[in-house]
Amino acid sequence: MGTRIHVGAKPAAFYTTATYVDSKVAHPRTVALRIDEGAEALLISEGNTELACWPLKDIRRLRDQAASEGMVLKQIGLQNLARLYIEDPDTTRLLLARCDAPLRKERPMNRAKILMWSVAAMASVAVILFVLIPNMANLMADRLPAKGERALGKATFQQIRSALSEDEIVPLQTCTAPEGMAALQALGERVSRGVELDHPLQIHVLDDPMVNAFALPGGIIVFFRGMLEATQSSDELASVMAHELGHVVSKDPTRHALRSAGSIGVLGLMLGDFAGGAVVLFLTEKLIAANYSQTAELEADVFGLERLNAIGVGTGAMAMMFTRLQDAEGGPDAEGEGARFLRYFLSHPLTQDRIDIALKDGPTPQVTRPALSDAQWIALKAICD
Amino acid sequence: MAATDLDTEFVGRRKALFGLALRTTILTIVTLGLYRFWMKTRLRRWYWSAIRPGGQPLEYAGEPLEKLLGFLIAVVVMAFYIGVVNLLLMFASFSLLNSSIAAYAMSFIGVLPIVFFARYRARRYILARTRWRGIRFGADAGAWGYAWRCLAHWLLTIVSLGLLLPRQTFYLEKYRADRTQYGSASFTQGGTWRGMYGAMTHQLIGVLGTGFLSLVGFSGAAPEALYGLILSIPWVLYGWVSYRVRSFQYLTNHKELGEVGFDANPRPRRVLWIYLRGWFVIGLAAAILGGAVLVAVLLAIDPSALNEAAVQSGPRWLYFAVAVPFYFALFTFYGVLSHVMLTLPLTVHYAETLTILRGDRISDVLQRDRDDFAEAEGFADALDVGAAF
């Protein structure tokens, strides 16, 4: 215990003045302070009138005050707005020594209420993110007119190009060597022959070493340069394209784009603007949007195989690719072509089912012809040169 | 009875604020942002308690947990609005207009009324949690009325190429002020919007001067006129600061609280100096921090070769190991320095140049009821349009 103030029965050893407001009227009063030792309380009086009597154990000091000297005191309880302003450093020291717990926190709110609201908030955000938005996106994807779908695809493509670019201003470049483009177009026409499409296919190659390919709304299919380099024959590339065409036909990318348009704002809201919020936001959105459902992938596989059969391209290519993936040692973090390939297919989950489908797929067409001629394949390989 | 004026003093020290801001910012980062509700509360308590009109400090009585609760409530409402409404807008604009720009514009415009709504609610919350002499401040409901007035005034200001800005500033402040109370007394905003044009003088000189000089210079009539831009462009900057300070002064000096009046005398040059000095210090700190990190990286990669090639060949994890703490350090210093070098000196200046006229009449003001505020400033927080501190 600090300084003890001895107060006799009659003369008050502790006697000082301070400013007091009673919380009823905005009138600051100069008051006398005295400790009533019997009642263990601080008496606040103006002249002969006693204005207040605060039990010492109930006195609290306001926190985080800017003044380096003095203090503001109150009586415990949020409803108590009466304040005692003390300027004098000595009085501050002496009085603090007599108060039992001037800094003990008042518990202002029911914690159960906070907890309940936290759970409710999480639950409703989860419902919005994982039920409402996906379902709305599914409904909308089927009703979006063809022109609108293409516009959505173009906008998404622009966003992806900007996001992947290392340069802030210039988006990631596409490869456009004319012979290569012609070969790519020929491959697209062959793979989609006989399929009814809302849009003519639009195929791009992005100049990036990533081993990846994806479809966008409105019949846009995009390969990365890395994918062209990793495939060993035009048949393999045709099987990737047939798979992506499966997504185009089932409108998976449209659903996906609409869904991320809805969820990105919600995530931004939740994570707020605190340091690196944007970074966390980007990563989280990536996580959520990483892949279509396993069913969608399987359907795209089945569609792809049917396509290859229909156009007379050997389906062995797809099976071979899957086998190469399985043989790839070292897992997704290793370097080397197989592992990089594997990493791409992680977003297209590889299961035994899918390999089985590829291997056991019905009768291989009687006559097979490579997806592209040798000359076309060479031109396509050189599309980025 | 002779009237007595009350001066306002400011008692906070920069060093103390630096410590408080630094500690709370670090805690905010460590808790992934959760502590920000406590940070805001504690900083406000500090600022409020430093401002002492007539010798008694203001008191900020907001609670961190009510802010957290308000944020959660706002998240539920806004998640629905932003998620579902944005998606519908997106769908509509792609279906009908085949364009994403329309969708972005629509969703921006769609969120605007909520931003203004949130600002009014946040102001009302802060007033409801502000006390002086044990008496509460407060504001009337009216956030939607404020939101559509904001939209209308902004539209007018944009259409009039900014010439009606004083009208906007005046009427929006009048809307807010006329709904503000201190205990049983109500504020009233006097003056006229035309009276605000005096505040715009330097702004107009700067903008018109720059326009004229550019016209003459770029048309080829007198290319040397372009040198005048060296003077006229900073003038636009000064004009902007001057408008903010002088319009504040006009509006404050035309406010009344019953018989009580106000006399604000902030000086535009002082405010400009605070801004320039503050941004200079922040920029310098960022440059020093960035330079130190760059040197550290270079030395870590290859102590002998301080050149660009070394940076190119460094392993990727090294960038992360350096970049992430650097990012957080920068964030921390920006937050702390902007408090110490901008918010604090500005608050000091505005507080110390404010006199409350006939302040003795305030003694008759009676207490008002507590304004329960379930969502606190949750919407402003969720939308990140909160007050400066």
Image: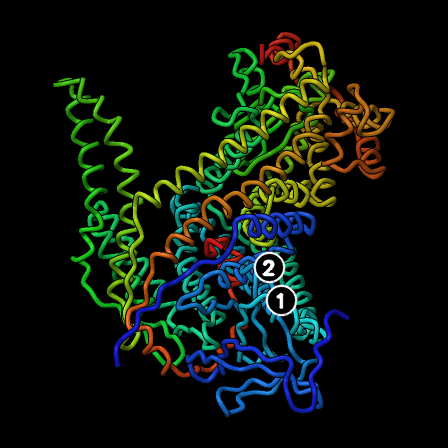
Image side of residue A143 versus residue A292, left or right: left
Mark 2 highlights which residue?
A: B37
Q: Where, by quadrant of the figure, is residue A124 drawn?
A: bottom right
Q: Chain letter of disc 2?
A: B
Q: Is residue A121 above or below residue A340?
A: below
Residue A6 versus residue B162: which sits nearer the camera? A6
Q: Amino acid at mark 1?
A: Leu
Residue B65 shows up from this direction: yes
Mark 2 or mark 1: whose residue is earlier in sequence: 2
Q: Amino acid at mark 2?
A: Phe
Mark 1 highlights which residue?
A: B65
Image point (67%, 13%), residue name: B310
Mark 2 neighbour class, 10 Å CA radius: few under 14, some 14 to 19, many 20 or more: many
Q: Which mark is residue A176?
A: none
Give coordinates of residue A154: x percent, y percent: 48, 34
Residue A259 shows up from this direction: no
Give coordinates of residue B229: x percent, y percent: 24, 27
Q: Secondary structure at mark 1?
A: helix
Image point (70%, 18%), residue name: B299
Asked whether the residues under marks 2 and 1 belong to the same chain, the reply is yes
Q: Secondary structure at mark 2?
A: helix
Image point (65%, 36%), residue name: A246
Give coordinates of residue B344: x percent, y percent: 47, 50
The furthest residue to the left? B221
**Badges 2 and 1: C-beta atoms under 8 Å apart?**
yes
Q: Chain letter of disc 1?
A: B
Q: Where, by quadrant of the figure, is residue B272 drawn?
A: top left
Work out which quarter of the rendered image holds the N terminus of chain B and state it: bottom left
Residue B123 versus residue B57: which sits nearer the camera? B57
Give coordinates of residue B43: x percent, y percent: 55, 57
Residue A266 versus residue B321: which sits nearer the camera? B321
